[in-house]
Image (spheres, grey):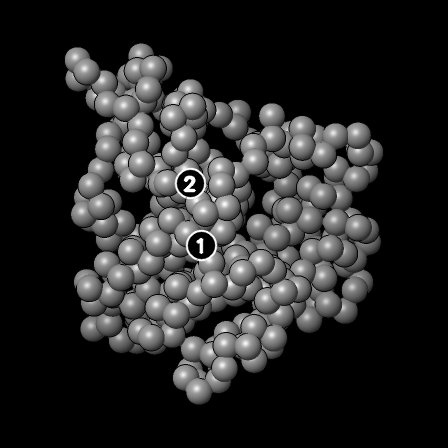
Amino acid sequence: MRWTFLVAPALVVALVCSSAFSADGPSSGDAAAPVFQEWQIWEVKTGLVLSFEELLRALGPLDVIYLGEEHHNQWHVEAARQILQALLRQERHPILALEMFGWDGQAALDRYLADKEWTRDSFLKESHWEQSWGGSFGDYEPLVALARAQGLPVLALNPPKQLVRLAAKQGLAQILADPEMERWGMKDETLVDELAYRDMIVKPLRQCHGGLSDNAYQRMYEASMFRDEGMAKVIAEALRREHTSAASEAHSKPGPIISYTGGGHIQYQLPVPNRVLRRRSGSVKQATIYLTSFEPGRAEELRGLMQESVADYLWLTPIGAQGAPKRCR
């Protein structure tokens, strides 16, 4: 495995002047600044609220749309489902890519999508749902069910969990000789160790899991980098296949890829989007949508996410059935 080190500019770059924000939210210069509310979609670079139709027009030319969720929030799943349905109405053929499945579950995913007689229980067992993700499959079933009904492909984004755990336990340098690395095509991959990305990963780890050794934080960081590079590998390879297919079938209108992961895998473009961009030598059109639950007391935090350009779009939703996510301070 090759390691590449990049010296990146500072992680947080304020793209929107702070004077453009009121106490409750961004303003485009109106006398009465708009406030943050549920179901608003903010375009971060302009500080404007978009309608769903305006968002769709902006997403139309893209190759990849990254949705970053709060895990098990049904409203975030619904937002993704609405985007998929809208693309289908436009006679597109989107590809859904899910963090919730590991590469060792791809064969089961393919069979479940194609074989309408195959049972849900058998699918969950063969796809290693409990081992790879766990929790209620029902939380994410609307996305898989839509893909199954509409004949859409679904990509398993995550490297096998046992391999990620091995990286977290032993470190990447120690697992290069593991046969599983070669089996899954990761032995000779280039992992880019970007300083801004490292800061984004390690700082919260130290805040939320204090008291560990520096070596432990390093291994956890390497496992995160391994996962993000693995996800980027899946998306970049799917883009290559789609490009080849589109070249041979000029009348078709394939894609885009809808990547659905936790918000931590898309923020500031660093975890997965930038790695896909590198793998495609910059020849990919993509955007990030950061889904986050709205709470009135989060106005300052939301304002900060906008100023820091956490994503291209910030989509505010109701709090999920499991309550507001725990936020480490």
Number of residues whose C-alpha sits closer than 10 Å to that of mark 1, classed few (under 14), some (14–19) or many (20 or more):
many
Look at the numbered discs 2 and 1 and tell me whether their residues touch, using CB distance below 8 Å.
Answer: no
Where residue 7 appears, as percent x and y from the top left, is 59, 31
Secondary structure at numbered mark 2:
loop
Residue receiving disc 1? 260
**Residue beneath the point at 50% across and 77% down:** 120
Number of residues whose C-alpha sits closer than 10 Å to that of mark 2, classed few (under 14), some (14–19) or many (20 or more):
some
Amino acid at the residue labelled 2: Ile
First reached walking from the N terminus: tag 2 or tag 1? 1
- Eyeballing the image, is 186 above or below 20? below
Where residue 20 appears, as percent x and y from the top left, is 29, 16
Residue receiving disc 2? 319
Secondary structure at numbered mark 1:
strand
- Eyeballing the image, is 121 above or below 64? below
Q: Can you tell which quarter of the image residue 250 is in?
A: bottom left
Where residue 316 appears, as percent x and y from the top left, is 35, 37
**Residue beneath the point at 63% across and 41% down:** 193
In this picture, residue 219 sits left or right of residue 247: right
In this picture, residue 100 sits left or right of residue 28: right
Which of labels 2 and 1 is toward the front? 2
**Which one is in front, 184 or 244?**
184
Q: Can you tell which quarter of the image residue 291 is in?
A: top left
- Eyeballing the image, is 27 above or below 291? above
Q: Looking at the image, how many numbered discs can be counted on the residues?
A: 2
Amino acid at the residue labelled 1: Tyr
Where residue 151 appears, as percent x and y from the top left, is 34, 76
**Residue beneath the point at 27% across and 49% down:** 59
Alpha carbon of mark 2 to alpha carbon of mark 1: how far?
18 Å
